Amino acid sequence: MIYGRSISNATEKTFAKRNDHYAFEKLSGRYSADKMKDFMVANLLEKPELSIWDLAKPGAEEHYVDWQGRIESLTYRFDSDCSDVFTWVDENHLHFSDLFVSTDNKGPILERMAIQRYIHLETLVVFNKMLDFMHCPPEGVMGGERVHMYWTVAKYSYFVDCNIPKLKAMVKRKIESEYRCIAA
């Protein structure tokens, strides 16, 4: 399948025979194509093994509204997460670059912070777009958690639309003005 275009041999008759055709019809009238893509992304982040029935449940709408809020406030949340991360780095007498280095096969600190939900997933995605520091860990390292996070970030990056130069300048200003000791 090419993104934006789907090729299907299904006919209306075979579609009508499907057990889940009701769920597809219910969802098709709810959103435009672009909004449906966002709706699905929001729900796939919550539950990677998603079925069409999951999308038809009331909780799916809640996931979508929450995701919309995160995307709409991306710059604010990124700034807030940076403050929290830089304070943590400062308190632990580390340097900015230490956030992106994998130590003891545990993965980069920033990745671990996202796994522990200390920072938002979108913050990790933005930093990875800036610095391309995440690499797929070898299988068996820290279970499948790091591998799952790597693939989530790699796939989700496409959907996180942000002004990288603006955010990069914000990080630089924040380090220079508020967290001088971590810049070394």
Image (cartoon, rainbow, N blue to C red):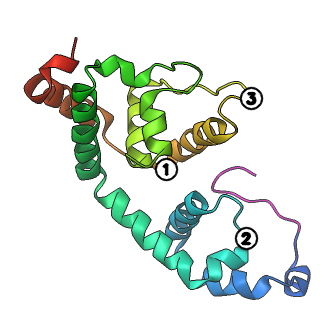
Front tag of 3 and 1: 3
Q: Which residue is mark 1?
A: 159
The residue nearer to you, when weighing 79 against 40, is 79
Q: Is residue 31 visible?
A: no
| Residue at the image point whose x is 38% and y is 25% from the top | 99
Q: Which residue is mark 2?
A: 51
Please state the horizontal and vertical placement of residue 161, each as a whole percent of the image. 40, 47
- Earlier-in-chain disc, 1 versus 2: 2
Give amino acid for label 3: Glu
56 to the left or right of 91: right
Q: Quadrant of residue 7?
A: bottom right
SS state under label 3: loop
Magenta extent: 1-9
- Earlier-in-chain disc, 3 versus 1: 3
Q: Are marks 1 and 2 in contact (CB under 8 Å)?
A: no
Q: Which residue is mark 3?
A: 139
Q: Quadrant of residue 149?
A: top right
SS state under label 2: loop
Give amino acid for label 2: Ser
> Is residue 6 highlighted in magenta?
yes
